[in-house]
Amino acid sequence: MVQAAFINPLSEDGKQIVRELGSLDMVSTTNEELIDVINHTKSQEISSEIPQNYLDLALKRMEWHLTRKNKNFNYKEYSFLMNKNITPFDVIAFYLLCQAIAIKFGPNSRESRVMVESEGELIESRLGELAGWERKEVVTLVLNSLISYSSIKWTFFKDLLSSKKLNLQDLILDKGRIILNKEEFLDHFGDRIKHRDPEKMFELVIGDKVKELIVTGMVMQNTENYMQLVYEKSRREIEPNPVLLELADKVSKLLSESARNYSYGGGFATDVKASPLNPLAFPPCVKKVLEGMKSGGRNDAIILFLTPFISYARLYPGVFAENVTKRVSDVDPHLNAVQNEILPMISGAAERCTPPLFEDQPQEKVNINAKMGFGMHDTLELKNEGETLWYTPMSCEKVKIHLPSLCKPDKTCKSIGNPLSYYNRVKRELKNSKDSRIDQRDESSSKN
């Protein structure tokens, strides 16, 4: 039988596994039982890279998530993660990751977000590997421990719905109550279904799929909640365990290496990488706003146009090529570039407006934070990230419609659809031109 902890490490049997471990003294010691489980996993590729202890297993968990969508991913290196016998070791690895990340980086960090996402993907993959009867059995077991079937209101899932871990359209409701089991479905809808078999309709619209979505979403949400609790508790303690801090640093390094080598979410990274801004490559419309708006459209030019452009040009210039949604903290974890480069440039443009934007309308600082994804707050802080979206740069077509005074196209603009594309192209041309001049100079020097 599959343990509930294989799918939900936060279950009662998962908590019992943690209690039996006791202290963290042994988590970095070679664990022969773990190695034996891995060596006896079907299809497992045995190499020197297999986890030797709990800390290794924790990092492999994250590595699997970060690399599994890349075309060179080797499934056989991670087969052990789908082995139900890994459960007692995997649960410890889960708790180590949650605690390390929450203590070092907090619940609103990119590390925390990736941890929650990785847990969701691991649950989906594990369920997909189980035999049909095992899958149904463990989903029912976990679901029964998470919720009571009697009179579940849709508001029970308000956190899941607000965080988009579950969509309201995935649920079948009757007068605000969620219908999950066959008996309830037949009782509420059986007489209303005409010309179809009500039992087959249940399997079609609810069945196991919705239950698995709920289980996955709830475990992800509970993982998030657990890290929040760990973080709050850690603020009251004097000194975190060094083992956890070391693991957190390794997780952060793993994420940074993945971001450099691959576009997060799959596929190889483009050649358009984050780097300090080069004003020489800015398109005419951006240069005009940076000079200070002297006429109408001042607010929209700074808030809706310049803020997304400057932030993406500095932090994520390849957004349209990679087509992967990111948060600012994914590419600027400590907001150093935001505070030292991006906001000063935007503030400078606002100051040069007539009248100066923030003197005239200081509340617009809040809108700048919001357009970068940090909610409607006076100060830009990591804890608020995700409350709003990080707006992508306005297209040339939208600039022409909403801010026509900015659109004074030059030769390069004719083959461009977005100011950010203009910036990437000209920046690349400037670099190639500079490299060419250096090559010519070196060649001339060698002749002399």
Image (cartoon, rainbow, N blue to C red):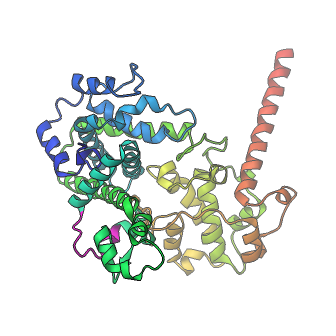
Quarter occupied by the N terminus: top left
Residue shown at 52% from the left, 72% from the top = 367
Quadrant location, the C terminus: top right
State whether residue 215 is above or below residue 162. Answer: above
Q: Please tell me whether residue 133 is drawn above or below residue 203 in the rendered image.
A: above
Write down the quadrant of residue 36 in the picture: top left
Q: Is residue 155 magenta?
A: yes
Q: Which residue occupies the foreground of this view, 352 or 108? A: 108
Q: Where is residue 69 in the image (x, y as percent from the top left)?
A: 52, 41
Place residue 393 in its image quadrant.
bottom right
Image quadrant where residue 126 sits: top left
The magenta stretch spans residue 43: no
Residue in the foreground of this view, choosing between 296 and 14: 14
The spot of residue 343 in percent (x, y) is 54, 61
Would residue 22 be visible to someone looking at this image? Answer: no
Residue in the foreground of this view, choosing between 364 and 254: 254
* Spot occupied by residue 37 in the image (x, y as percentages of width and height): 28, 27
In the rendered view, tell whether residue 71 sits above or below residue 112. above
Residue 410, above or below 446: below
Q: In this view, does 435 lie to the left or right of 179?
A: right
Q: Report the magenta residues as a range.
A: 147-159
The answer to whether residue 135 is left or right of residue 10 is: right
Count of residue discs: 0
Extreme-top residue of the structure: 447
Residue at x-position 23% and y-position 57%: 229
Residue at 49% x, 39% y: name it: 68
Residue placed at 85% from the left, 21% from the top? 444
Residue 303 or 83: which is nearer the viewer?
Answer: 83
- Report whether 283 appears left or right of 360: right
